[in-house]
Each structure stands twice: as C-alpha cells, then as structure tokens.
Image (cartoon, helix red, strand yellow):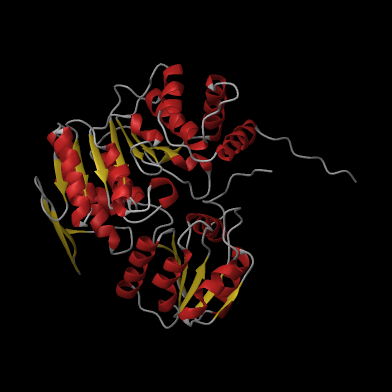
Amino acid sequence: MLLMKREETAYQRAITYLYGLQKHGIKFGLSKTSNLLKAFGDPHKGQRYIHIAGTNGKGSVAAFVASILREAGLGKVGLYSSPHLVRFTERFRINEREMTQEEAAALIEELKSAFTPGEPPTFFEATTTMALLYFARENTDIAIIEVGMGGRLDATNLITPLVSVITNISMEHQVYLGSRLLDIAGEKAGIIKERIDVVTGVTQPSVIRLLESKCAEKEAPLWRLGRDIHYRTTRSGLHYYGTLHRLNRLQLRLKGRFQFRNAALAVALVERLEEKGFKISAQDIRTGLNKAAWPGRMQVVAQGPTIILDGGHNPAAIRALADSIRSDFRYRRMILVIGIMEDKEIAQILRAIVPLSDYVIYTRPVYSRAAPPERVMTEAASLGRPGEVAPFLTGALDRAREIADPRDLIVVCGSLFTVGEAMTYFDPETYRPDDLH
C-alpha cells in the first residue's frame, strides 16, 4: 500500500528555507541587516527598545523586565530572544504570546523578496530583521532585544535603545569574540551608545575599567550592581536597594540563587525607565518579579524524584547551577543526565557538575552539533563518578527515572538543545516542536 506523503505547510517550507541559511555560518557585521531593514523602510527607527548583552542571564533579565512592564500596564511588550528551546516562533513574543506560524511564514516570504540574489543573509541576520519588522508593525510599546553573540557587530546592534544592559562577562565563543576576557568584554561593550544609560552586573576589575572608559567616551551613564545598586538575599527573599526603590522580601518564581542577581539587574533597568517617564510602581515590580517565567532555567518538571532542567551551556552557568543545587535542594542521590554541544568547553563544564553527582548518564539530543556521549564520558573519566552512555536523550531520561528513588534528584543539563528536547518529553502538549520533515 502506498503511504501518502503529507503536504508541507507554508510554515514548514519557510522555516526549512530559513534554517538552510545556517550553512552560511556566523558572519559579523551590520551591513546586511541594515540593507534588509532599509528595504522595508527602516521600521526599527523611532521604536522604543531595551538592549541586553552578556554571557549568562540575558533571557532571565529580559523575562523579569517584560513581566514588570506588563504589570505596569504597558499594552504591548515585545521580546526577541535566542536560541529557541522547542519552536522557532518562541523567539518572537508580544505579552508572552508567540508569533503564530502563519505570521512567521508570511514574514519569511516577504524577507526573501528583499534578499540580494546570490548573497543571502545569515540565519541570525534574517531572524533579527524579522523581529524588528514584526514589533514595528505590531506597534509595541517597548521591545526587549537580546543580543545573539558579542554585541559590537551583532545584527541587533542597529537599534537605539532607551537603556543598554550588560549582565556579566566570562569566556565564551572565543573563536568569534577573541581569546582574552578583555577582547570579549570589548565586543559586548560595543552596544554602548552615545548618552544612553548602561546597567551592568560585571564583577572583574579589568572589565569594569573597560566599561567605565567606554561609557566616559560615549558620555553614557553607567549603573553598576555593587556600587550604585545593592541587593542581598535572606530566607525571606530578595532585598533590593537601588536609586529609586528600597524593596524588601521580593519573591521570585524562577528557581536558582543566580536569579536574585538577575532580578536586581532587572529592577535597576526598570529604575532607568522610570527616570525617563515610565510609570512603574513598587507593587508592579514586586508582582512582576514574582510572576516572571523563563522555561528551561532551573525548571522543576516533576517531584518524587525531583527532576530539574537547566539550559546552562558554559562553565560559568554550570557552576551557578551547581551552587544552586548545593544550597536549594535536599536529596538522597543526584543522577545527572548530560548532553553537550561539541564546540563547548566540555572538560570545564564536566568539572563543574560531575563531582556533585552520584551517577551520570551521558547522552545527546537529536542535533548535528551534539558531542558523542562516548567522548563526553571519556572526558569525565578522571572525575571518578560511575555512569553509562545512552545514545538518545529519551532513553537516558527513561533510564534515570528507572534507577531513581523518590528521594533522589535528577538534573538534566549541558545544552539548551538537551533541555528543549527534555521539555517535549515531559510535557509534549505545551512544548510541541516544529514538525519538519
């Protein structure tokens, strides 16, 4: 019997084409994105933006700010983030509503008509143009734009924001951003614009000096966590001491100690908006922080055993995850399910989390850039923890649940791709992936 092949939808065709642009790799520079935007009448000009760069925490800071602004009554708060966890359309949201597949397909078709023949943009240049066009047409009150990589030559750096944020800086993407911390910091500092406030959580003295010098050169006010803004955490919550607010016992729905720092940065950013005339109350901040959700970051998806998913994919993020596990969770044994991308600092990631584990299942998501689990297990051999290889993530999750006692903790981490696939496994209805043939 002949099986009828299902007809491809306009959305499937459009994003298959867009993913095909990934073969052009990562190219830094603003000219392609600038030319694309020009073809649509520069829709990004005159719009209100917040621009967020940094190694870790960008998405969480963005989620906190978006939630506070919605509480403050802004009708349309846009959020452009990357990468997505499960579906391409997650990258573009207005008030938590994802762009629809129909909107995405139509926008991609429009974009294609503006591509220079034989010289298409990269995947990220195309998606950034899509985001700016979408938010302008939807007439957002403000849009929060997360940097893809670096800052200076990132496709998002064509916007003029009301406030710029640099969350933190550690070693990442050295092939593209440079081999020294200060090279990476210099790239991220490239989002600093003339006379536009900068809020930062960086801690390294050499990086602070670099940002101070760049801000002085651009006459951009610099607001630093630890100098202008302070916070502390106790059992009763987050206590924030800023320039406009002193707020005690703030509660976060997002798990993980590192989220307190991200929340403090978000409030510092909101204070800059208040100085520009935005009406935001202490109650808006309190409720907004408490309601903010950001899937795949210290997300508890099951109890008895407790199962957490975390998308941290560099050594600093994995160290923060390990600190949170030590301080916030009580368990009998910890079973680690880990899948890492081949181009990441595998040995350092393993050193940060494997010693905390009692048993490790090395696996991989269904993604071309994933490191073979056998190789990851070999890298971890010197850390002296028992473990096994599971060739597929679904099998690894089945195995972890099979060997776990209700008092155990299962931690799934190593990559956003690993976590995205795990989210579909645990909640296939909410996290339904794109159906691409």
Residue plotted at (42% across, 67% down): 348
Residue plotted at (13% across, 52% down): 229
Toward the right, the furthest residue is: 1
| Residue 297 locus on image (x, y percent) | 40, 58
Q: How many marks?
A: 0
Say which quadrant the C terminus sits in: top right
Residue plotted at (22% across, 50% down): 265
| Residue 62 locus on image (x, y percent) | 32, 45
Whether residue 124 is visible, yes or no, is yes
Toward the front, the furthest residue is: 179
Tell me if residue 120 comes above or below residue 266 in the rendering.
Answer: above
Tell me if residue 69 comes above or below residue 246 in the rendering.
Answer: above
Nearer to the camera, 36 or 12: 36
Q: Quadrant of residue 295?
A: bottom left
Q: Quadrant of residue 78?
A: top left
Tell me if residue 265 comes above or below residue 217 in the rendering.
Answer: below
Whether residue 279 is visible, yes or no, is no
| Residue 195 locus on image (x, y percent) | 16, 31
Tell me if residue 368 comes above or below residue 333 in the rendering.
Answer: above
**Relative horizontal placement of residue 177, taking residue 340 as reference (left or right):** left
Residue plotted at (23% across, 39% down): 72
Nearer to the camera, 238 or 28: 28
| Residue 75 locus on image (x, y percent) | 30, 32
